[in-house]
Image: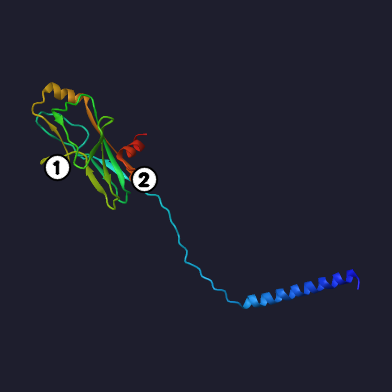
């Protein structure tokens, strides 16, 4: 036999054997039961957290200064339901001639001064996540005005009263910053004040 014929026969034999192997492989593979397993899917849902606050005051915005007569003033910050844990701030700004030794107020318990030197009038508190509206009075009250009071000395003179009444304002502003990821009130305030 010539080399050509030998080559042709061996190729035919090889192709025949290959076809037989494929047929046997398919037959055997089709009858083998593979062990398999599947888990239930785990779905991760991401939502955006929120902080919602409100600053209210029911006593009005204009007041007359009268010696010896205290003034009801009830600013209140409310952290609204379903808010995340937060750093809560209130900034109290005095403008003009405020006779502090004869017309006074005090910040309610639970508020801490941030840094009187660098941030005068800024107070803060840490608030956990809330499921219901949670109120925080800003000023300390007294027996007559339990939700907040500005105390006016009976020694206030007419000239001092006129100075206070015509040139001064007391402004309250509330801020909130998420607590998660922020370790200190100073860090949180930096995010508000920028």
Q: Nearer the viewer, residue 146 or 191?
A: 191
Mark 1 residue element: loop
Where residue 92 sits in the image (x, y, percent)?
Answer: 24, 33
Q: Nearer the viewer, residue 147 or 25?
A: 25
- Residue extending farthest to the top is 159
Q: Residue at x 12, y 23 (%)?
A: 158
Where residue 114 sits in the image (x, y, percent)?
Answer: 26, 36
Mark 2 residue element: loop
**Left-right relation of 37 to 115:** right
Q: Quadrant of the C terminus?
A: top left
Whether 128 is drawn above or below 102: the answer is below
Read off the residue under disc 2.
181
**Left-right relation of 107 to 87:** left
Read off the residue under disc 1.
146
Where residue 139 sits in the image (x, y, percent)?
Answer: 19, 38
Q: Earlier in the sequence, mark 2 or mark 1?
A: 1
Say few, some or many: other residues with alpha carbon within 10 Å of mark 1 (under 14 / 14 to 19 / 20 or more).
some
């Amino acid at each position: 036999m010539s080399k050509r014929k030998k080559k042709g026969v061996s190729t035919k034999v090889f192709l025949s054997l290959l076809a037989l192997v494929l047929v046997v492989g398919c037959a055997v593979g089709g009858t083998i039961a593979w062990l398999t397993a599947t888990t239930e899917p785990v779905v991760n849902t991401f939502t955006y957290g929120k902080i919602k606050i409100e600053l209210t005051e029911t006593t009005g915005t204009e007041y007359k200064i009268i010696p010896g007569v205290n003034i009801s003033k009830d600013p209140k910050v409310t952290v609204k339901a379903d808010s995340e844990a937060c750093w809560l701030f209130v900034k109290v700004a005095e403008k003009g001639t405020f006779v502090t030794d004869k017309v006074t107020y005090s910040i309610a318990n639970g508020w801490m001064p941030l840094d009187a030197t660098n941030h005068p009038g800024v107070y803060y508190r840490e608030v956990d996540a809330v499921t219901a509206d949670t109120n925080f009075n800003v000023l300390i009250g007294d027996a007559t005005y339990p939700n907040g009071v500005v105390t006016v000395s009976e020694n206030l003179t007419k000239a001092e009263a006129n100075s206070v009444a015509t040139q001064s304002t007391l402004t309250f502003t509330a801020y909130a910053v998420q607590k998660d990821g922020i370790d200190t009130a100073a860090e949180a305030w930096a995010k508000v004040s920028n």
